[in-house]
Amino acid sequence: MSAPTSTITAVTPEGPEVAAVPAKRRRLRFVANPKAATGLVVLAFFCLIAIIGPWVAPFDPSARSSDLIQAPSGKHWFGTTHLGQDIFSQVLVGTRGVMFVGLLAGLVATTLSILIGVSAGFLGGAADDSLSALSNVFLVIPALPLIIIVASTIPSAGDLMVALVIGLTSWAWGARVLRAQTLSLRRRDYVEAARATGESTWRIITFEIMPNLTAIIASGFVGTVIFAVMSEITLAFIGISTISEWNWGTILFWAQSQQALAQGAWWWFVPAGLAIAVLGTALSLINFGIDEFVSPRLRSSGHMRVKTKDGHSVRMRVGFTPVLSSKQAPVTPVVRRREEEVA
Amino acid sequence: MKFLLQRLTFYVFTAWAALTINFFIPRLIPGDPVTSLINKFQGQMSTDAINSLYVLFGLDKNASLWSQYVDYWGQVFRGDLGLSFTFFPTPVAEILRQSLPWTIALVGITTFASFMIGTSLGVLAGWRRGSIMDGLLPVTTFLSSIPYFWLGLLAITLLAGPDSFFPSSGGYEPGLVPSWNAEFIGSAVQHSLLPAVTILISSVSGWILTMRNMMVTVASEDYITVAHAKGLPERRVMVSYAARNALLPNVSGFALSLGFIVGGTLLVEIVFSYPGIGYNLFQAVGSKDYPLMQGVFLVITLSVLVANLLADVAYLLLDPRTRKEG
């Protein structure tokens, strides 16, 4: 978590110049994590396409042409549909809707989960009981069928509406995690100290508790974005949200309804699906980066196998202290002696 | 016992909440799609059927909200979920009764299998951290980021075809009549292989990951060090000490995420035109069949609640601490 940097600044007497160094290094460490870095780069790429996509698309995604169901070529990079529409343009233009819904739904859900989770954890008592019950109910009720029903009952479900429906139904997981963490922070010494100095509840929550929840909030946000993107594409795929707005799900919807499979038109659904998978992977990688940043134990990289001088190799492992015996060592390791006793 | 009672109360509460949400959704949304459907089938429906739809969708503007609510509950308890418009004039309850076994067989078995496989692989990956198993993680991440339905589409293109062993759609050979004979069961299994593999591939990685992370956390506990120091065999420490403790949060996570998983797997049924409730939902959405949609939501929610209860019983058996007080 990012909080320790601020305590260092407060404690060290050397002044801001020295204190600035650890803060900088810490921030870099997150980006230096190869998983997080890869994820961020890919995410930035998709954001860029979301912004410039409609301008750089070579064709109008809805424009028909005489090139019906054509395989990828120089003119149509991802091939064409049954109406001669350019699939490459559809993917480019569709990115904006996907990113917009994902980020907005993530934002709505994260805000809700902070409000509900942190107040439940901090207030305790009856407020906690009722808020936890509420989030558990939302957690157990299958979200996707609920979203499908709500979205299909709304007369015209545009991007904004879909994002709101997804955001309003998928906050429960984040709220649960935040509540648990707040509960463990609530009785820490520094919070008690803040309370003793007479700070208001809201100040304690925003300035003492929230900074320590940053990582959890971030990973909850990323997780919700993944879920929102998947849900939105699913809604478009089964034909609930308006098919006049392009997104990757709409492409798959047309591919499915026009029997792209039976016609062997693999290029119709492969690019959109791959784009979903790559975006999802990028977001998951960012989440792994956050997880590993918070709890370094989870890191998989690192030198795990150590060779001793006499050729034994020992695998280092958390929670297990290897006894490296070498002939030069004057003291025989404890483990050896016990083995002899047993024998 | 106290633990189980607590959970039971919670599930009853959730079931009530789900039914209430189901009651309010058609009433809060502007527009009235059901009346037009009723008008379309005017003359073909009995007065009873029209009445039950009036109760379910709150079309009777004269009744107070409370009396509508009471009527709604009475009707749900009688198992009357209205008539389906897609399969007119079959009642929704009848359609769901036919398709639920298919979904339970496909989604139930694959979800359970994927949990078991994923957890075992996660135990290995967490225990041998830094070995080849870690190289598996990016691959599984990628697989879990693929939407179920897209993987299904891909599987159909690559593996199914007119002369392939795998059928591309349906739950059994079109000519067969559902019954408990070898021919039908064989055909049903053959039809479910591809959807099952699709669900397995995309859902297994989540379990691998959570179990791995749990194992890594547990591996640094003192009792693991003690077990090593006692000279217990590696296998025993891994399975009986580390995995057993790491499993607990995974089981409760399994219970909580069932709602998410089931939602995703329903889509596989759509791609494969599998005769389960996911496919019903798809048909209902396509023809704006609101009674069927609501019925599907209700049945899915109740099934998830039952599955949750089962997971709680499993937790009870695994964790002696919950059994301590009588």
Image: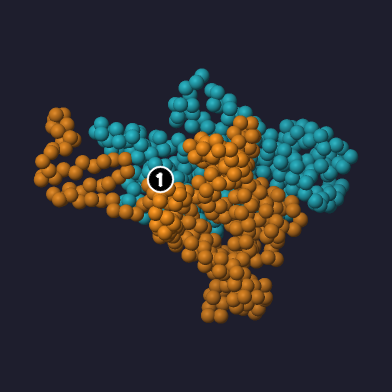
> Percent x, y for residue A81?
62, 71
Q: Position of residue B32 (x, y in %)?
A: 82, 50
> Going 50% across and 50% down the picture, which residue do you hit?
A215
What colour scheme has been applied to the protein in the rendered image? by chain
What residue lies at 49% left-to-right and 64% top-to-bottom?
A42
Q: Is residue A245 left or right of residue A18?
A: right
Residue A254 locus on image (x, y percent)? 64, 65
Amino acid carrying mark 1 in the image: Arg
The part of the image, by quadrant, that contains residue B63 is top right
Q: Colour of chain A?
A: orange
Query: Would residue A179 be seen by someone viewing this image from the given angle?
Result: yes
Q: Quadrant of the C terminus of chain A?
A: top left
Please give the residue where the numbered disc 1 appears in the rendered image. Answer: B212
Instruction: Report x, y in % for residue B321.
Output: 46, 26
The quadrant where residue A95 appears: bottom right
- Packing grade of label 1 (10 A; few <14, some 14-19, many >=20) is many
Query: Does the rendering let one see residue A240?
Result: no
Asked whether B81 or A52 is in front, the reply is: A52
Palette colour of chain B: cyan
Q: Residue at x 36, y 55 (%)?
A: B135
Which residue is located at x 70 percent, y 53 percent? A151
Left-right relation of B316 to A90 = left
- Taking A214 as reference, is A79 above or below it? below
Q: Tag 1, which chain?
A: B
Disc 1 element: helix
Q: Is residue B270 above or below residue B58?
A: below
